[in-house]
Each structure stands twice: as C-alpha cells, then as structure tokens.
Amino acid sequence: MRSESTICALATSGNGAIAVIRISGPDTYNMVDTIFLPSAEGKELLKQKPNTIHFGTIRNEETTIDEVLVSLFKAPHSYTGEDAIEISCHGSPYIQQRILELLIGCGAQPAKPGEFTQRAFLNGKMDLSQAEAVADLIAAESEGAHRVALQQLRGGFSGKLKELRAQLLHFISMIELELDFSEEDVEFADRKELISLIHEIEQLVNGLINSFQLGNVLKHGVPVAIIGRPNVGKSTLLNAILNEERAIVSEIEGTTRDAIEDTITFGGINFRFIDTAGIRESADIIENLGIRRTYQKIEQASIVLLLTEASDHIDMIHRSVEVIREQLSDGNKQLVVVLNKSDRISDKQQIAIQQSIPLQTNERIISISAEMRENIDGLTELLLDIVNIGSIKHQDTVISNIRHYNALKSASEGLSRVSEGLASALPSDLLAQDIREVLHYMGEITGEVTTDEILGNIFKNFCIGK
C-alpha cells in the first residue's frame, strides 16, 4: 500500500540543540528539493543515492532559514516503506516552524499522531504488535518497560504466532474441502496432526496470557500503598525508601491528611509508593477524608505495606492484619506486614512475633527500622521478589498490551472448544467454525485481521512525528 499524500512533522520534542523534521510520501524528494540548496554544486537531491546525508541550507526564495543535514531514504528501504527524508536542523522553535510551513506550502500535509508508523504497518514494514511496541518503547520509563517493548519490536511472539496461524489456516482449508465431499465421507485433514497443532498453539497462547501480569508490572510500574495507624512511621518509611525528605514527619497524630505519592526504580522496575493518612477513628472532618482516601488507595495498590510497631502487643498486630485482610478483596494483591521500629526490641522477640502471625499465600512479613534506615534494602529486595522480575529471564516473551491479552483470552477459549470438538468427533462444519474464530483472534494481534476502528484506537495514542 502506498499513500498518495506526502506528510511532514517534527519528529523530536522539547528544546534541544538539534531537531529532526520527517517527510514521507511520493512527492518527498521534489518538495525538499524545492527548499534545499546543497552546499556544493552538482549535489541536487534528485541526483543523489539513497541512504546518504547531505549538507546545505533551507531557503525561502533568497532568505536562508537554517543550515541543515538532509538524510535520504528511498522506498521500500525506509521506516514507512515510502520515499522519506529527515531534515536535521537547529532546535529553535522558529526554525522548526518555518521549515514545516515551507513544506506545507509545497503541498505536504501535517502528519496525524502515529501516521508514520501506521504507514509502516500498512506497507508491511512491521506487524501491528510491533507498531504498538514503538509507542511503548517511546513511553518506557524503566529498564523493564524498555526490555519488554524492545523484545516486542523485534518480533517477540508475533513471528511464532503467524507461523502457527498459517498452519491452522491450512488445516481449516482441508476441513472445508471435506465439506465439499461430505457425501463421500473422506478426511483430508489429519486429526492427529491437528490435535498436536492445537496443543502447541494452546501452550503458546496460555503462556503469553500468564505473562501479562508481569508484563503489565514492567510496563506501568507497581503501586504500593503504605498504611497503618497514625505515628507508626509511614512517612518516615517513605522518606527512607526515597532517600529524601519527601513527607512531613511529626509526633503529632494525623499530620498526613492526604496521600503523598512518589516513584523510584529498583531492579529496573518502577515502584509508585503512596504514603496514606493514618487509620483511626477521628472527629476531624478533614482527617476522615484522608482516611477514606487511604481505603481507596488500598483498592488501587498491587502491594500493601501494613506498618505496625514491632513493640506492639501481638494481639494488636493480629487485629491490624485481620482488618486489612478484609479490605483486600482482590486475591492478586500482596500484603506485606512491616514490623517497624525493630531497633527497640531484640532479634529473638522479632522472630517470635513473625512466627506467631499465620500468613496466607499472598502475604509476607519483615522487620525494619525506618528511622534508623535498618533493613530498607531487605524490604526493597522483598518487593522485587514479589514482582518476580527474575522470571522474565526464563521466558521467551512477555506481553504487556491489554488488547493482546483480550485477544489471546478469546483465542484460548476458542482453542478449548476446538480441543473438545476433536475429542468428541464434532462434525467438520462446527469444528471449522471454532477454528475460524481462533484464526480471527490470532490475526487481530498481528494485524492480519483488523478494522479501521482498531487502527484508529491504536494510532491515536501515538505522538505526532512517529
């Protein structure tokens, strides 16, 4: 697919020494040649080889706008698969705007968000999952998010998915051929081979589905709520984790009346810590609003750090744990009981307290001293262990895109029906219907099956210039 229009946009953002303006489409070379004057005679753009860079000036008639470098790309060997040029100019907003105005004056259209990548997809330079990875790579704020996006951009799981889909497409062709000879009761599709293929696809699809929770964490980070009664050391713990005085620490109860949030990266993962108002009964209207927000933050968090004082009576600690357990309606949430101010009791007492609290499968316990900065590293290591970042090293790929997750879930349900149909010798026409559904959802991920609505929803979230 080649677009008839030529588009242009600024491909860099913010203030910098250099800016890049990208042009793509059939009239790219003619448009840039109109405004570009090479530094040496006989170096007109239309005569130059692709994949070369040329120095010169951008001019509006006799007025010089800027000295620039022009990078040339010829179809199909460009990002979009079309003729394309990138102009590297100085970072002045005035210069950028003037060059764009000149290009538009030559007939170029301002690019829409994601239009360059959309053209790359439509021209077969990448599949749809790779196109989505471009936006994820740009937005990556941590090593983990970068790793997942780069893996997907390089093909990730889409290559294997396409290969298996092609094999499944062959089988449905054979099954539908059987329908044409239904009166002769013949089988063109080997059912044993089909069962083996369905099993292989199920393994891949279910593995990807199971990776989503980790992928989502790597992409978006982990929200961690710090909760507990007033003056138990929540703000002190936040400051210790961030290694700065982010929250006000006071002996006065109820100092924290609203949630304070900040983000820090451990082991390539973003953790968003939320210091909440102390939980207690209060006649103060403002403090009660803060306590209400604390319970809201518990709902939003993936991990809840329940702070208690290590010197508290064991019954009080038990009651605190039970109260928070009732709030954790989502079984996927992790609860960490943090025995703070552990420097005030002996190691033997700490061990006795930890052993006295029966923990459930999604619960951990640890002793620290936020004020003395003791075992803060142990707490961060525990958080990384909960996230299970190490598991990514043993997996071929991880998904982090909700659209992929939903499509894979639907494909998995279809695969289950195909397996059941094969086991029960389901008639070929009904079996073909279930296989077609699986093909549809597998194709949705890579873009082999798509609609304008899907494309619109994906590329509208891109930045302009990409």
Image (cartoon, helix red, strand yellow):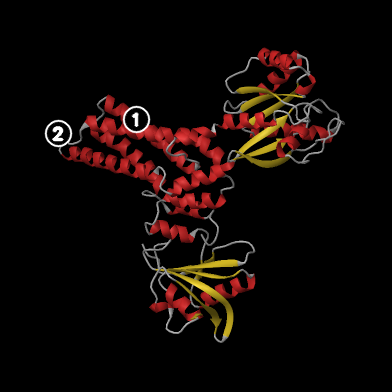
Q: Is residue 91 above or below residue 310?
A: below
Residue at position x 34%, y 30% in the image: 417
The quarter of the image holding the N terminus is bottom left
Q: Amino acid at mark 2?
A: Val
- Rendering coords of residue 45 (x, y %): 43, 77
- Rendering coords of residue 243 (x, y %): 73, 39
**Is the residue marked by circle 1 packed among few (<14), some (14-19), or many (20+) residues within 10 Å?**
some
Q: Amino acid at mark 1?
A: Arg
- Rendering coords of residue 363 (x, y %): 62, 22
Q: Is 381 left, or right, of 195 in this rendering? A: right
- Rendering coords of residue 312 (x, y %): 78, 18
**Which image quarter: residue 3?**
bottom left
Looking at the image, the residue that sits furthest to the bottom is 62
**Which image quarter: residue 221?**
top right
Residue of label 2: 186
Assess whether mark 1 and mark 2 are in contact (beta carbons under 8 angstroms): no
Q: Decide which of 277, 244 is in the foreground and name it.
A: 244
Q: CA distance from mark 2 to mark 1?
A: 23 Å
Residue of label 1: 417
Q: Earlier in the sequence, mark 2 or mark 1?
A: 2
Looking at the image, the residue that sits furthest to the right is 252
**Is the residue marked by circle 2 packed among few (<14), some (14-19), or many (20+) residues within 10 Å?**
few
Q: Secondary structure at mark 1?
A: helix
- All told, the count of numbered labels is 2
Q: Is 347 left, or right, of 92 in this rendering? A: right
Q: Is residue 460 above or below residue 171?
A: below
Residue at position x 59%, y 32% in the image: 384
Q: Is 104 left, or right, of 161 in this rendering? A: right
Q: Decide which of 350, 184 is in the foreground and name it.
A: 350
Dot label at residue 14: none
Residue at position x 38%, y 73% in the image: 49
